[in-house]
Image (cartoon, rainbow, N blue to C red):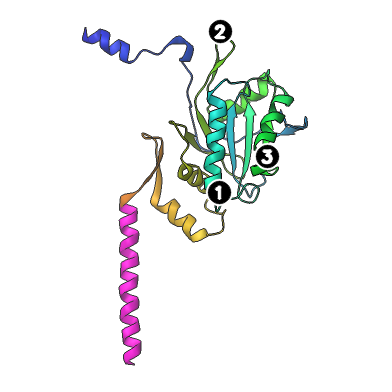
């Protein structure tokens, strides 16, 4: 009986077996050609200008529920990050891993969200070879089902300004704006946004927890930082008193 329960608890239905994210940081995007919402072919590696990180959202445009929700939640999370602006601090690439999706499909999604992105996001399609190549670089494993739909992970990716995979953000019911912010900061090494001091503070005090699949406060780093600041404050007070007596 216990053996049967154990088998059931580890059973994976055939339809979703192998559908997962096998993420590896440092993989470089190269050799991938897609077509954007304006029907222009482009090398994906050309998006990376060495200055801005790129948020990559895999989806398929005719997905009945999940993909559109992920894109919407990503959009809502980015809106809430007030000090990071699309085009100035990051770019966005949305691509369909369904090679049957068309430029027209991409264009519809583009116009739905472009009021916020203002041309800094690309919505792309590609042939089966190129969309699979990009997905493999990300470690994004999907599978087409008998009914024509796709089984796929629910995740988005942050890539460095030179086109290397940096981090993955899982959608566990919602996309946390802080996770998106920290992923973009990590990908850019804190070199985006208006306040670099706050960026470095966040990068120092938060670390990605692979078990919980989100960024969490590193308590010992926070305590250490508070200790250092307290010592500096005390020394500053003594210095002020000493100078006043002089």
Category of crowding for the residue at label 3, using alpha-carbon neighbours closer than 10 angstroms: few (below 14), some (14–19), many (at least 20): few
Q: Nearer the viewer, residue 239 or 86?
A: 86
> Which residue matches tag 1?
188
Secondary structure at badge 2 equals: loop
- Pinpoint residue 79: horizontal percent, then vertical percent: 56, 45
Q: Nearer the viewer, residue 147 or 143?
A: 147
User: Is-magenta flag for residue 11?
Assistant: no
Which part of the image, by quadrant, shows the C terminus?
Answer: bottom left
- Pinpoint residue 142: horizontal percent, then vertical percent: 54, 20
Mark 3 or mark 1, earlier in chain: 3
Q: Is residue 152 visible?
A: yes
> Which residue matches tag 3?
114
- Residue furthest to the left: 1
Dominant SS of magenta comes to: helix
- Pinpoint residue 150: horizontal percent, then vertical percent: 56, 17
Q: Which circle, 1 or 2, is nearer the viewer?
A: 2
Q: Is residue 102 above or below residue 206?
A: above
Q: CA distance from mark 3 to mark 1?
A: 23 Å
Mark 1 or mark 2, earlier in chain: 2
Residue depicted at 52% across the width and 59% down the height: 196
């Amino acid at each position: 009986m216990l053996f049967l329960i154990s088998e059931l608890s580890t059973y994976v239905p055939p339809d979703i077996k192998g559908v997962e994210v096998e993420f590896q940081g440092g993989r470089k995007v190269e050799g991938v050609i897609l077509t954007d919402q304006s029907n222009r072919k482009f090398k994906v590696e050309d998006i990376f200008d060495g200055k801005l990180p790129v948020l990559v959202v895999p989806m398929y445009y005719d997905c009945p529920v999940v993909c559109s929700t992920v894109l919407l939640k990503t959009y809502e999370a980015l809106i809430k990050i007030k000090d990071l602006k699309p085009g100035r601090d990051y770019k966005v690439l949305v691509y369909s891993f369904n090679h049957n999706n068309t430029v027209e499909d991409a264009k519809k999604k583009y116009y739905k969200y472009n009021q916020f992105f203002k041309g800094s996001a690309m919505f792309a399609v590609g042939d089966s070879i190129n969309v699979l190549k990009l997905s493999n670089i990300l470690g994004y494993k999907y599978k087409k089902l008998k009914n024509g739909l796709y089984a796929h992970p629910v995740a988005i990716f942050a890539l460095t300004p030179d086109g290397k995979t940096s981090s993955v953000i899982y959608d566990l019911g919602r996309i946390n704006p802080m996770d998106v912010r920290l992923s973009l900061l990590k990908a850019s090494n804190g070199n985006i946004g208006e306040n670099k001091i706050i960026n470095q503070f966040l990068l120092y005090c938060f670390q990605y927890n692979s078990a919980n699949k989100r960024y969490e406060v590193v308590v010992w780093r926070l305590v250490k930082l508070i200790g250092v600041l307290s010592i500096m404050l005390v020394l500053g007070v003594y210095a002020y008193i000493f100078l006043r007596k002089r």
